[in-house]
Amino acid sequence: MTTWEGLLYGIGFALQPEVLVYCLLGVVLGTFVGVLPGIGAMAAISLLLPVTYYITPEAALIMLAGVYYGAQYGGAVASILMRLPGTPQSAVTTLDGYPMAQQGRAGVALFAAMASSFAGSVIGIVVLVVLAGWLSRAAVAFGAADYAAMMILGLVAASTIGTARPAKGFAMVVLGLLLGCVGTDVNSGVQRFTFGQTELLDGINLVALAMGLFGVAEVIANVRDPERQSLSERIGLRRLMPTRDDLRRMGWPTLRGSALGAFFGALPGTGSTLSSFLSYAMERRVARQPERFGNGAIEGIAGPEAANNSASITAFVPTLTLGIPGDPIMALMLGALVIHGIQPGPLMLEARPEMFWGLVASFGIGNLILLVLNLPLIGIWVAMLRIPFRWLYPAILVFLCLGVYSVRGLSYDIAAVALIGLAGYLLALARFSPALLLLGFVLGPLIETNLRRALLISRGDPMVFLERPIAAGFVLATAALLLLSLWQAWHRRASRRG
Amino acid sequence: MSINLIRSVALGLAVASVAIPASAQDTWPTGPVHVYVGFPAGSSPDTLARIITDPLAQRLGQPIVVENRPGAGGVIGIQQMLAAAGDGHTFGTTINGPMTTAQRMMDDTGYDVSTDILPVTLIATSPLVLAVSSASEITDVAGFIAAAGAEPQAIAYGSVGQGSGAHLTAELFAAEAGVEMLHVPFTSYAEVTTSIMGGEIDAGFMAPSAALPHVQGGNMRMLGITSSEPFPQAPDVPVLAGQAGLPADFRAELWNAFIAPAGTDPAVVERLNTEINDILSDPAVQEQLLAIGWNAAPGTPGDLAERIVVDTAMWGAVIDRVQAQQ
């Protein structure tokens, strides 16, 4: 089957009424779990799993995939309106989305998020169809040394976003790295900072950390500060549509974010969180007025939202072409296929072309549904801010606890989210950026594990980071970035003196 | 699924119509039964549990709620089962790790296998296969042992974590073959597979269901299997025992079992054992288990108790050796 035949066949398949209904169901559910803070695609897919026993495997996969990428759309909503990232990936969107909402431009910010999400997905689909073979080879070619070097570049590039004071940003990244050390060390099996608590053996729950730092902390801040409560009433339905200037500013960031996301999404294990952080860092670096970032720059929404949606599409590349799930949610979806007696693997494509092309076509249809669904919803989401805070915040806390509990079913994590929330509030009072803490937390364990794994495999020879071409490329790029930053700092100081 | 359902219902009715001796099990179960699983929904241990609990619910005439409590290699599932115990309706399924080796890998699991847990029955066992990249020059176990013996750490192998079945099996193999290999821990077979295919590491002991698709896809080769009989899903893969100087009784299997908290009514344990053994004798169930890499292995509670003791000693010796090397 050629690509065109495959696509046509897939579109025909995905447009069958029965399949279409499951696609619609998936993306609608995805949007809602994305909007609800803490409840993510993982929880929704786990719940849907028993349902999939009774439908065809193709329809099951299309529905579960819809939840997966649909959640990326919804994630931006609460980030922008209430600084509550619906998913960890959309934490970056709070940086400029929330300031925009505060300026009365919530509708525009939501439009930017939806439009760039759609554009990112479309680009992701094109990349998936055209470059799937190349990307899957790249995914296999990436070794531990390459991952370590790439993540270090990501950490260096993104470690100053979301804060005006580099020292404070750096402190948060380091705190995030330290928190990432909690749990069983993959390489040695040693339990670090677990204090004898089994619940900490797999590390601090990412959802509990993200929801505590952002969600609970924000609720406390709002309860304490009546000024902020009245602020939300100022935000009206006015100016839902972006200006021509807004649209112009969104173009390139969306394209760059999509490209970044498409690449990182295809690498197993890195996923969309990294790509949205990197996209934000990149936009701030190439911007003519970087000081606008953090104060409601529309580029800071368009880039990361395009990136995480694009990544959520190409994340299917290793899953579909190699049969290797890139993250736990993908593994869960493959589990759904196994129940139907389909063994995911490199041969699945040949054995069941209808599954691959049907899924790819459903991505396009699903994203179209998401766009059509979400644009009219913008007005409703914005109107949500008119709900009195005494109703809104308790409801948010309930959903948040539900979401955190849904990850592992442990009440331990609910206590953890409360504690983290308190710490997050104190950090916010001192104007530390929680986004950077999250970045350090996500990247830290990945860098450490891959760095030590690379040295283990090279039998202790550090030259492995320069001998492997991919790793060497990232090391050089990191060095160049550091030199550039030093030069810029020196230049600024010199010009101030002159 | 629906044929299974009908069959289960029919079996359930048949069982119900047979007179059951009057005792505690006359009234049990009086409400929904909870089965704790220490792994997330959709994982292999979870799928296995659901293959058993679906027909079991039909036979017991009460719904069974599978409670996924993932974490710490399955230990959290057992902890949570024990915390919820006391109503006579709380049980669990577990892999071998939390019952045999976890005590050696963790400071405190919070339970004592011999006093806090009642064995109900073994459900299934799974061998591991020794897999290499299809680009590798090694084509059989003898060649593998020769390559590994060329110098210490000549071969790097991947596992799914320190103290995992994949790790300990490889170390048992290394000790029996008299070689020393470099252990590279990963967290999933997906990562191990990628690393083998990328040529970064040389080999790995893997679950057959994780390796088979890549063997069929032409990216991997299986050199041997750790069970004492060939595995039905991969009948061509030779048994490792007795090959290339390995002892004739070489055997390493992972298993999955149904357990109850201590204090559970013995009659209830007996009833569960009978029902699950009956379910496992259904060829359709056996087929479902094989499809996810498990071989049905019914038995008595005593069989499971013995397996726990034997495996704890066997893996304990391997852990002693690994820790002595470090």
Image: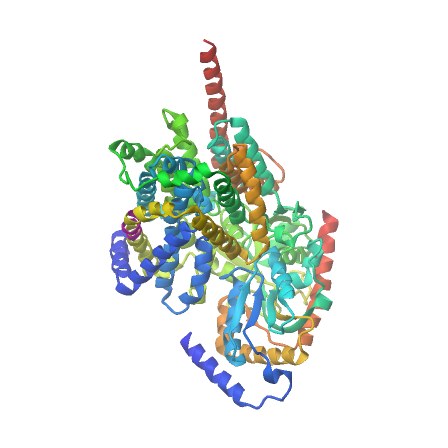
Whether residue A388 is visible: yes
The image position of residue B208, as x and y in percent, is 53, 62
Residue at image position (30%, 35%) is: A251
Q: Residue furthest top?
A: A498
Whether residue A145 is visible: no
Please check the rendered image and state whether residue A418 is part of the magenta-colored stretch, yes or no. no
Please check the rendered image and state whether residue A372 is part of the magenta-colored stretch, yes or no. yes
Tell me the quarter of the picture where residue A245 sits.
top left
The one of B269 and A132 positioned closer to us in this rendering: B269
| A427 in relation to B52, above or below | above
The image position of residue B39, as x and y in percent, is 55, 60
Is A116 left or right of B321, judged from the image as shown? left
- Magenta stretch, main secondary structure, is helix
| B129 in relation to A283, above or below | below
Q: Quadrant of the N terminus of chain B?
A: bottom left
The image position of residue A297, as x and y in percent, is 37, 32
The image position of residue A420, as x and y in percent, is 57, 44
Q: Coloring scheme of the render?
A: rainbow
The one of A68 and B130 positioned closer to us in this rendering: A68
Range shown magenta: A369-375
The one of B296 and B7 positioned closer to us in this rendering: B7
The one of A95 and A415 positioned closer to us in this rendering: A415
